[in-house]
Amino acid sequence: MVETRVLSTTDAEIVYDVDGPLPPADGRPVLLLIGQPMDASGFRGFATRFGDRTVVTYDPRGLGRSTRSDGRTDSTPQTQAEDLHALVAELGAGPVEVFGSSGGAVTGLQLVATHPEDVVTLVAHEPPITGVLPDAAAVDRASRGFREAYQAKGWGHGMATFLAMTSWSGEFTDAYFAQPAPDPAAFGLPTEDDGSRDDPLLSDRSLAVTDYRLDVERLTSVPSRVVVAVGEETGDTYTARTARATAAALGQEAVVFPSHHGGFADGEFGWPGKPDEFAAKLREVLDA
């Protein structure tokens, strides 16, 4: 049975879910599943694939059920990593194994860099770190495109531009920027503007994630094991390229996982993955 708990810090209330005993009955580390800007709900189905283990998911501060009182709206890997450090201490069952998805993978890298004693193994699945790419300046320009579309026309237009960017294969060339603005209706998205501008993905709130600077020297010297993963169906799109480049910077090759960027999901993102195969691969990597 899943138990929902709250970790109170000086400036946040972090809601997390524990599925299994603490400390784990089998002596294996807790498996911590983290995302960004996705909250614990995105792992609900995937977590059930690990019924023999104690699994913990959480809502990052300011997202989902978690609140913050620090007067900020941005989501920095540094702040999120400190919250996770406090969470591991609260669990009283560290060090843990971590699967980090997307921005959660970046948070996981920061957690290993600053608190390696908390982590046995981190599997960082497609961390969106722009600075590792040779066309980083063009990527930044493309990213500004979806944020500007969001600010000018609302969520549907911003999301359509985001999807066009993240589905582009290869480097961002003049051909990408010469395209007409995508039509939200073509993606089944609303064309009307609801007036909101606080989306954590389309606003500037997650800029610190993609702008994260990888501490290669630190990450390759700590005792924690870091595995960078990439989806077999992600092709040569942005997050596949950042995953491979991050792995190369750390002196490794990205481990290929089934499906795509959200391959662990049952379909929560509108594009079903292969959660059973994904879970089997994660078990294999963690047990290696």
Image: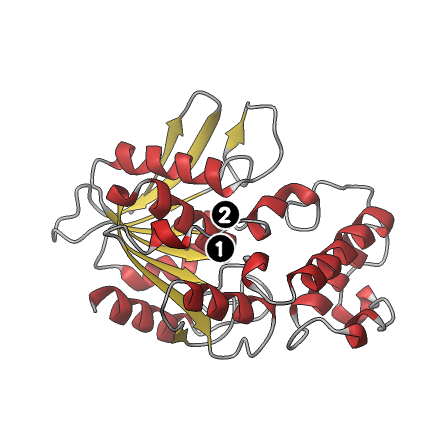
208 or 66, which lies in front? 208
Image point (37%, 52%), residue name: 217
Q: Residue furthest top?
A: 10
Image point (49%, 59%), residue name: 127
Q: Determine the secondary structure under disc 1.
A: helix
48 or 82, which lies in front? 82
How many numbered marks, from 0 up?
A: 2
Amino acid residing under circle 1: Gly
> In the drawing, does residue 234 fall left or right of residue 58?
right
Q: Residues within 10 Å of mark 1 (few under 14, many from 20)?
A: many
Q: Name the residue carrying label 1.
A: 42
Amino acid residing under circle 2: Asp
Label drawn at residue 39: 2
| Residue 2 shows in this picture | no
Residue 97, placed above or below residue 166 = above
> In the drawing, does residue 8 fall left or right of residue 184?
left
Q: Are marks 1 and 2 in contact (CB under 8 Å)?
A: yes
> In the drawing, does residue 23 fall left or right of residue 282?
left
Q: Quadrant of residue 53?
A: bottom left
Q: Determine the secondary structure under disc 2.
A: loop
User: How far separated are the C-alphas under marks 1 and 2?
Assistant: 6 Å
Image point (32%, 56%), residue name: 220
Give coordinates of residue 209: x percent, y percent.
56, 48
